[in-house]
Amino acid sequence: DAGVTQSPTHLIKTRGQQVTLRCSPKSGHDTVSWYQQALGQGPQFIFQYYEEEERQRGNFPDRFSGHQFPNYSSELNVNALLLGDSALYLCASSLGLVRSVEQYFGPGTRLTVT
Amino acid sequence: GQNIDQPTEMTATEGAIVQINCTYQTSGFNGLFWYQQHAGEAPTFLSYNVLDGLEEKGRFSSFLSRSKGYSYLLLKELQMKDSASYLCAAPLDNYGQNFVFGPGTRLSVLP
């Protein structure tokens, strides 16, 4: 049973550049949520995708955008990178929009902006 | 709004018992979650409380008091592999799928 997978595992970008991170949900899941986790802090909710649409969004600027594909995989795009965007980006998957007791997280992508 | 607070660091000895506290203020209540996160890894689900009281699951137990906005995670018979961050989290809404997390408590288990 394939869990949540993310790529790449590590990434180094320069301030002002754009980055795309990818996530494949756990087998059987169709909903993907993205979180940003700065060093030493808890994850912060960015947004959630279901049926290829953004369903819920946290307090993040428009520089953060996403997409979900028909196969339920998802991308997170960040434009005009800032030093403060350096963080671990986590993807979590679940089934539908019905409450689930737990979310399954991927291993994350570590983004460093220099 | 949602606000969750927990101690940032704790240290305990192998074989001991440790209690990690969490206080929360949420606009609604849809349960309280605990996750474990080893350094550089994904958070993994530990427990979920929606009613007051203690939920026991092996060496780990979680307690909730809704009237006090308080929860704790109790870890018994500590092992070195329990060294990790422990995240307290509350759902953002009644769908319960997206969370606000506390800052995490980094637990170091010493021999």
Image: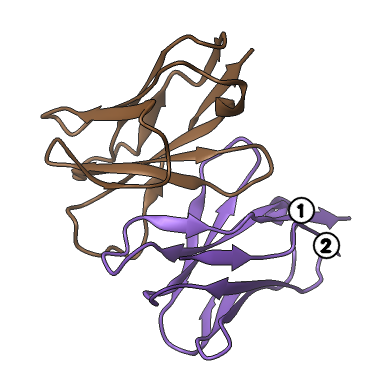
**Which of the chains bears the disc numbered 1?**
B
Task: Look at label 2 and name its amino acid.
Answer: Glu
- Name the foreground residue: A66 vs B108: A66
- Name the foreground residue: A6 vs B58: A6
* Cα–Cα span, label 2 and label 1: 6 Å
Name the side, left or right, on which A94 lies relative to A28: right
Colour in which the image shows chain B: purple
Which quarter of the rendering shows the C terminus of chain B?
A: bottom right
Q: Name which residue lies at 58% across and 65% down.
A: B4
Residue A6: image location, x then y, percent: 39, 27
Q: Which mark is residue A10?
A: none
Q: Name which residue lies at 34% across and 65% down.
A: A101
Q: What secondary structure is marked by label 1?
A: helix
Name the side, left or right, on which B89 lies relative to B19: left
From the viewer's perspective, is residue A25 above or below residue B108?
A: above
Residue A48: image location, x then y, percent: 28, 44
Q: Are marks 2 and 1 in contact (CB under 8 Å)?
A: yes
Task: Look at label 1 and name its amino acid.
Answer: Met
**Counting residues from the N terminus, which is met first, the one under dot 2 or under dot 1?**
2
Q: Residue furthest front?
A: A61
| Crowd tier of the residue under label 2, counting other residues whose Cα lies within 10 Å: few below 14, some 14–19, many 20 or above | some
User: Where is mark 2, residue-wise?
Assistant: B14
User: Where is mark 1, residue-wise?
Assistant: B80
Which quarter of the figure has residue A86? top right
From the viewer's perspective, is residue B101 above or below residue A48?
A: below
From the viewer's perspective, is residue A14 above or below residue B85?
A: above
Q: What secondary structure is marked by label 2?
A: loop
Chain corresponding to brown in the figure: A
Q: Name which residue lies at 42% across and 87% down.
A: B51
- Name the foreground residue: B22 vs B55: B22
